[in-house]
Image (tube, rainbow, N blue to C red):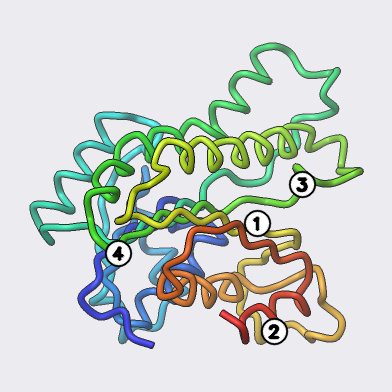
């Protein structure tokens, strides 16, 4: 499948999950914008993407939790390419702040700000633009910890963040109900994602552990499917079967 002539933005594209998404979109021909606070992150990202696809990448230095930076990024994308077709939001990494009852109020507020504020600012900045762009999409990448019956108590903020993201997706769908331009998707992941190629894993022994490029391969298919929905991938086997059906 080809995504040539499509302009995309992967928010969190320098992260573990995001880097695999960037690579997949670039290899399918899309132009991929990526933002980061430090230029060194772009160099790290380029090492994970085959050199022949580097010409499909565009970088912008920005803090995605900052409204001014996000607006400047939007202006740069539009002044350069004239449009944005698809946005994938994959932000918020692992945190081990401690059990919930041991956190200070500042710990809690700072943690939730780091985990959720960039998603809000990016959505606030770009969703209206996409809602006015035919055959566009906004894809939220979320984690399955919000559904877990038990989770590492040291990482107490992650299930709260995941649940907040489920709510953000519901709010987005409610806000743009009836919009015929933008498709809204949530891709909910229940396994560990490592910063190394998925080919380095034995699929039979790694049901709950995948490489960073495993998730990326689903994004072009979700874009071309053009259907608003929540997609859950609980294990590698579930993902493999889903990939065949998309």
First in sequence: mark 1 vs mark 3: 3
Q: Are the two marked residues, 1 and 3, in contact with CB atoms closer than 8 angstroms?
A: no
Mark 3, residue position: 145
Q: CA distance from mark 2 to mark 4?
A: 36 Å
First in sequence: mark 2 vs mark 1: 1
Give coordinates of residue 177: x percent, y percent. 42, 43
Mark 4, residue position: 135
Q: CA distance from mark 1 to mark 3?
A: 9 Å
Q: Residue at x 61, y 18 (%)?
A: 109
Q: Residue at x 77, y 65 (%)?
A: 234
Q: Nearer the viewer, mark 1 or mark 4?
A: 4
Lateral position of residue 239 relative to residue 16, left or right: right
Q: Are the two marked residues, 2 and 1, in contact with CB atoms closer than 8 angstroms?
A: no
Q: Which dot marks residue 200?
A: 2
Q: Which dot marks residue 188?
A: 1
First in sequence: mark 3 vs mark 2: 3
Q: In this picture, is 34 found above or below 24?
A: above
Q: Nearer the viewer, mark 2 or mark 1?
A: 1
């Amino acid at each position: 499948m080809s995504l040539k002539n499509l302009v995309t933005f992967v928010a969190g594209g320098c992260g573990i999950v995001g880097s695999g998404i960037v690579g997949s979109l670039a290899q399918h021909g899309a132009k991929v914008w990526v933002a980061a606070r430090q230029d060194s992150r772009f160099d790290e990202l380029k090492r994970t993407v085959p050199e022949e696809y580097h010409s499909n990448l565009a970088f912008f230095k920005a803090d995605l939790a900052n409204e001014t930076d996000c607006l400047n990024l939007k202006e740069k994308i539009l002044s350069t390419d004239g449009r944005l077709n698809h946005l994938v939001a994959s932000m918020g990494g692992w945190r081990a702040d401690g059990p919930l009852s041991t956190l200070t109020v500042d710990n809690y507020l700072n943690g939730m700000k780091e985990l959720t504020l960039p998603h809000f600012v990016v959505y606030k900045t770009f969703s209206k633009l996409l809602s006015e762009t035919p055959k566009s999409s906004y894809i939220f990448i979320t984690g399955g910890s919000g559904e877990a019956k038990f989770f590492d108590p040291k990482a107490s903020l992650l299930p709260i963040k995941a649940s907040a993201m489920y709510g953000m997706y519901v709010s987005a769908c409610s806000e743009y109900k009836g919009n015929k331009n933008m498709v809204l998707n949530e891709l909910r992941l229940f396994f560990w994602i490592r910063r190394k190629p998925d080919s380095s894993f034995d699929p039979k022994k790694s049901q709950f552990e995948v490489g960073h490029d495993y998730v990326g391969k689903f994004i072009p298919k979700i874009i071309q499917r053009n259907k608003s929905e929540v997609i859950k991938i609980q294990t590698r086997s579930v993902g493999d079967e889903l990939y065949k059906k998309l």
